[in-house]
Image: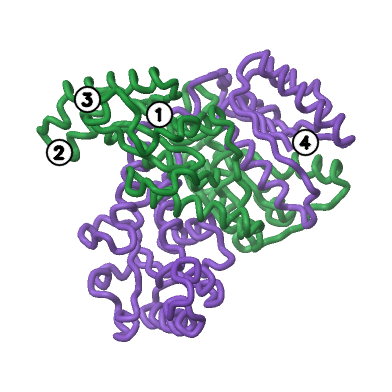
Chain colours: A green, B purple
Amino acid sequence: MFYVSDRTAITSETIGHSLLAQFETAPDYREVTIPYVDTPEKGAEVVTQVNAAAEADGEMPFVFSTLADPVTRNQIHESRGLILDLFEGFLGQLEQALGAKAVVKRTRSHRISNLSSYEARIAAIDYSLQHDDGARIKDYDKADIIMLGVSRVGKTPSCLYLAMHFGIRAANYPITEEDLSTSQLPVPVAPFRDRLHGLTIDPKRLASIREERRRGSRYASIEQCRSEVRQVEALFKSFNIPFINTTITSVEEISTRVVQTRGLDRHTTV
Amino acid sequence: MFYVSDRTAITSETIGHSLLAQFETAPDYREVTIPYVDTPEKGAEVVTQVNAAAEADGEMPFVFSTLADPVTRNQIHESRGLILDLFEGFLGQLEQALGAKAVVKRTRSHRISNLSSYEARIAAIDYSLQHDDGARIKDYDKADIIMLGVSRVGKTPSCLYLAMHFGIRAANYPITEEDLSTSQLPVPVAPFRDRLHGLTIDPKRLASIREERRRGSRYASIEQCRSEVRQVEALFKSFNIPFINTTITSVEEISTRVVQTRGLDRHTTV
């Protein structure tokens, strides 16, 4: 699988992974990403690599391509790969619908096109880091979302993804044994009921994650993990806080579901 | 612009933004993302929304769609939008090439398909947070990359993106005035020359960012910022450390260039 682009190739990779995920039994493959293919020389290099892979494996390589320049695009089509070219099909349709021609902007894209939206994303990352793990309980009124969960359930990566991708100010607050013993919401987050979102996890998985941190501790024992998970889920239910299980759910999906459940805006423009 | 998917819609958004970035003068548009369109009922709701937008604006909405199920896919095609359907064209080509049928997996995708690769990404985020801003200088031998730069140049978001997206353990170390006065690499990072990557920034932009943190301080003055930037760039050059300007470069592009310059692997599979 080749992911080829005149820019970062992040789009090519995303498309490739989405398409390959549609097949039950994905074939064994090796992935090669080639960003910044923005000259005929680099185009020729890609063709050489694709043809060498075809030769070596005796199989047709797949090439997921987002090349805006017709020159390099045509080069790639001369290779021995199966070319899945995002721009070929769609750009023509968009040009017609918009009544405008696409412009080859070799170096400008994936640069910052919308500074205020980009700065909002960076500010959201700052906010989320400052408000990680209950580190700072001031300014919760400025949070878009406050994630709750027991220690090591996976609050931090989800908050960082929400901030990084969706420009959402995501704080997170750890639910401790002491909180659980009261069956009440922790005081700092209680005033923000409609911004709370819970995370839970399979107790066995939690125990194995905690083991890595404090081997053999009560904190990492399966009994302790079972008890905390049972109580925290009861807490979420009793206060009507939606929650998601992180055991089998990726940060991408957790973030999307949180955004949807809480009716937040996704600020994804770069 | 509608971004419609039976999953997170992150792919639809990525495709839409990539395509729209090809036009010099993008039209004014409103963005609506509709994830988890996985039943005919939800498909019908999308059609209603798209048609209502067409009615309200008197213009044809664009619908970037990644719907695997032919039933909902056909529904959407009955709407009054211009449908840009990733799966329609490419899935058939892939099916033929792979000699396999795509399977409608309504709920499984963007879940964790490759646990070890996902865990590596989460571990990279942990590592990068622990090694943010010189907080921990142990374990630099386990870093894939160590980003260097003056205070507020933008080290943290770049490191977090590298970890989140590419599964790269990215530490970062702040270059202080004291470091600059010696014209030497800071002692903790000096042994890791081939893992260092620099960041720089326009001094005016740096001053405005620092102003937000400490208004009216020497730290935020334009003279101070000019001097630090000049010296840090000289340092990078004298030690042959590649560097990127964060003023106009997004975290996506910074990360891609760092990966490319340092020959790192991108671990992007979810």
Depicted A131 relative to depicted B158: above or below: above
Q: Position of residue B229 (x, y in %)?
A: 46, 79
Residue at 42%, 77% in the rendered image: B219
Distance of mark 2 from mark 4, alpha carbons?
A: 52 Å
Q: CA distance from mark 4 to mark 1?
A: 35 Å
Secondary structure found at label 3: helix
Q: Tell me which amino acid carries mark 3.
A: Cys
Residue A227 occupies which quadrant of the picture?
top left
Assign a secondary structure to mark 4.
Answer: strand
Q: Pointer 2: what residue?
A: A214
Residue A123 in the image, given as x and y percentages of width and height: 51, 55
Q: Which label number is shown at residue A198?
A: 1
Q: How crowded is the residue under tag 4: few (<14 C-alpha within 10 Å), some, or many (20+)?
A: many
Q: Residues within 10 Å of mark 1 (few under 14, many from 20)?
A: many
Say which residue label 4 marks. B62
The amino acid on which the numbered mark 2 sits, given as a three-letter code, is Arg
In the rendered image, is residue A80 in sight?
no
Any part of residue A219 in sight: yes
Q: Chain of mark 2?
A: A
Crowdedness near tag 3: few (<14), some (14–19) or many (≥20) residues, C-alpha within 10 Å: many
Query: Contact, CB < 8 Å: mark 4 with mark 1?
Result: no
Which circle's residue, 2 or 3, is located before the other in the chain? 2
- State if disc 3 and disc 4 touch (CB < 8 Å): no
Q: CA distance from mark 1 to mark 2?
A: 24 Å
Q: Which marked residue is nearer to the observer: mark 4 or mark 1?
A: 1
- Name the residue that disc number 3 marks: A225
Q: What's the residue type where badge 4 is placed? A: Phe
Quadrant of the rendering where the C terminus of chain B is positioned: top left
Distance from the alpha carbon under mark 2 to that under mark 3: 13 Å
Residue at image coords 66%, 30%: B4
